[in-house]
Amino acid sequence: MARSRTAVLAGIGAAVLALAACGGGSGSDKAKGTNSSGAKVSSIKLVAAEYSKENTAKFWNDFATKYKAKTGVTLDVQVVSWNDIAQQSTTMVQNNTPPDILNINYYSSYAKDNLLYNADEVLPSSVQSDLLDAFKTSGTFNGKLYGFPDLSSARALFYNKTLFRQAGIAAPPTTWDEFEADAKKLTGLGNGTIGYAEPLGPEEAQAEFSIWAFNNGGDWKDSSGKWTINSDKNVETLAFLKKLSDEKLTQNNPGKTNRTDGAFPLFKSGKAGMIVGFGPLSSDLDKQKKIDYGIAPMPTKGASSPQTYGVTDYLDAFKKPGNQDAVKAFYDLYYQPDEVNTFIKAEGFLPVTKSGLDVFKAQPNLKVYIDTLPNVHLTPNQDPTWDKVLAAVQQNIGAAVGPSGDPKKVLDNLQKTAESGG
Amino acid sequence: MTDSRTEASLAGAASQPNTTGSDVAAGQGSARPSPPWRARRRRPQRGRAPWYVALLWLSPALVLIAGVVIYPAIELVRASVSHYSITGLRLGPAGGRNYSRVLDHPALATVLKNTLVWVVAVVVLTILISLALAQFLSKDFFGRRVVRWSVIVPWAASLVITARLFTLIYDYYHGILNHTLLSLHLISKPIDFLGDDRWTMTSMIAVGVFVSIPFTAYVFLAGLNSIPSDVFEAALIDGAKPWQIYWSVTLPLLRPAMLVASVLNIIYVFNSFPIVYTLNDRNPGFTHDTSITFMYKLAFKSSEHDIGMSAATGVFNVILILLVVMAYLKLVRWQEPVNR
């Protein structure tokens, strides 16, 4: 009895050791990143965020076919939802199996960890000169361009013309005071009408706060690169957003409302009078044909002219043995006007290249964005610390607009997080 | 398996002249003389097989256990003592720093309190409701089969889908629950079931109970069916009242089922991720997180964004649930015989 138990234990032990050895062995091999043959790869992998169910996978699959025809290299496409992509990409890097190209909303942490190719290594020089300067700046880490933008979006104020008429509002607000007065009039219509749909829940709180802060003359950092999250302007901005909530001019609980499943449906169903929107929301509204809406520049307070908050996502190029040429060919093809502009158009976003700007200028419904795009205001994506600050903002800023929220304290804490490097 | 088949074919080969069996013998190593084989085969081997034979038979199970239990556990511990970049890249060893950072985390007390409330409330409510439900389902009535099936349905649905459906049911503006309560004039304005801090945990517990009931009720139903009817007859003859019968006969005899149901439910509810995560995803911070969603947010959502810290929390979680289950088993003295 005792003997056999020892034997079984020994057996388990041996199996564990064997497996652990395998695990450790393969892991460390990959970690070294050496490829003994040094041969060129025959396939590369793209992990891409899903902008829309209808278009994203379709575009990338078509793209893979063209890419294969042109280069002979296979492009494996994996489309992942925005909810999961950060988790999946972190896990891939942790397991030493990063994709060759990753389409996601950050890059500088990867660049800091020395995992990415820079533009000189993989981006054709014609593309480099074609990129809009604002995006080039935001894509530059340590003096080199690592964040290659795939598309961009800019925000503006959407308003429901029917509700505006009912409330007797002639034109969209241009100042915060007008905005607040209009929101009061809209809420006064009763029947569950919401003046302004304010999504400060974790999904994209940084966007909602950014656009208001920029229009008050505030920012995340000052021109010298110092964090200014708890500046007076920003505290004033967050206090204003809380005031809107306290006065019940927003939907219930704005600090806990997400954008896509909370605020957008309220505007789409005609309940909300105003909301900060972007291209894909227009596409939805146009398809639905239920809401008569207009798009206006954001109302301002401290800023001299209306500011646009811009977002760009990136196509990160991971350094892997033998993949440099294949990756370079990928970008060469992607930034062909036919490809990049088709993708952007299908998803309802905005261009990232000067040549794209010319193409999209022709569309009247995009005018309000296109005019502002070259001066678009972005978040400090080029600072790896931002990737952590971003998470902290998303998880905490909503608490400031709750009934017992304290805007100053919340921003002070975020400032501390940023100054301590995340 | 291979072993016995080889012996059979060898036996066949040995009993015949060498003509047909030569290839088999060659395949198995013809250098080995056959007499010892035959002698060994003839020796009666009742009882124990030698350890290497046992190991061979056990090996598929062992490999499976090593692969899906032991190896991940080793990796978890390894990750918990490593220092990771936000990107997931391992930067080097961290010693015990991840563990101390978790213990120092300002939200830890809230998270542990939430975990306790969540597990106790869901398990206790589930068991009470399931006991009643099982009693009902064990009776013979018209349409019992349909009712039994309908109880299983929530169990068959994916937890994420169930949780998503409940976010729609609970919705402040469009939810059917608020709509119903409003039209029945039970409330004058909608309740923010998922956003109002006073309601969030209650709403999550309700869903937790809803998805735990099917399994638990069926465990109790099986337990009830296994009680022989003569003990009830005996109790009736002795003049016991229905409530006395339930308290002194049925419940004690349900003890094994109760043990299984509660231990499995404690583990299952403690580890429940989809419900808490899905119903709570709009709420900033850790106000309503249990230790499982806390672990996930540490790795992928919070400003820590740290796999090492998350792995350390994972180790704490395993230890915590082991302690809880052991304490529970000790409390109910599970090794005691059923008849007191």
Image: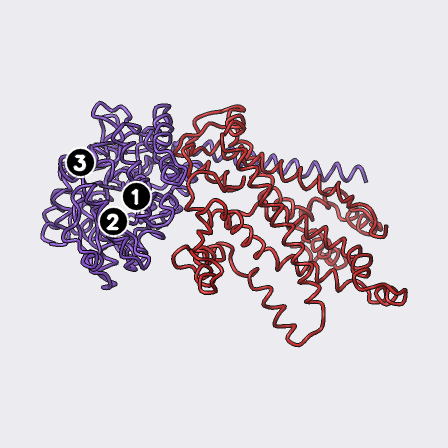
Chain colours: A purple, B red
- Determine contact: label 2, label 1, CB under 8 Å: yes
Quarter of the image holding residue A204? top left
Q: Disc 3 is attached to a residue of which chain?
A: A
- Nearer-the-camera pick, B303 or A68: B303
Task: Tell me the distance, in whole angstroms, between the alpha carbons under discs 2 and 1.
Answer: 9 Å
Q: Residue at x 57, y 57 (%)?
A: B210
Q: Residue at x 46, y 27 (%)?
A: B83
- For marks 2 and 3, the one nearer the N-term is 3
Give above or below for A12 relative to A142. Answer: below
Question: Residue A162 placed where, x, y %?
Answer: 20, 60
Q: Nearer the N terminus, badge 2 or badge 1? A: 2
Residue situated in front as seen by the camera: B12 or A139: A139
Q: Can you identify the residue that label 1 sits on?
A: A244
Q: Is residue B276 left or right of residue B55?
A: left
10 Å neighbourhood of mark 3: few (<14), some, or many (≥20)? some
Q: Nearer the viewer, mark 1 or mark 3?
A: 1
> Is residue A153 at least partly visible in the picture?
no
Mark 3 residue type: Ala
Mark 2 or 3, which is nearer the eye?
Answer: 2
Residue A183 tag number: 2
Q: Secondary structure at mark 1?
A: helix
Return the residue nearer the eye: A410 or A185: A185
Circle number at residue A134:
3
- The residue at the far right in this view is B238
* Three-letter residue code for mark 1: Leu
In the picture provided, is A172 more to the left or to the right than B65? Answer: left
Are dots 2 and 1 on a single chain?
yes
Task: Where is residue B302? Give x, y as percent.
Answer: 42, 36
For mark 2, give the secondary structure. Answer: helix
Looking at the picture, which amino acid does disc 2 mark? Ala
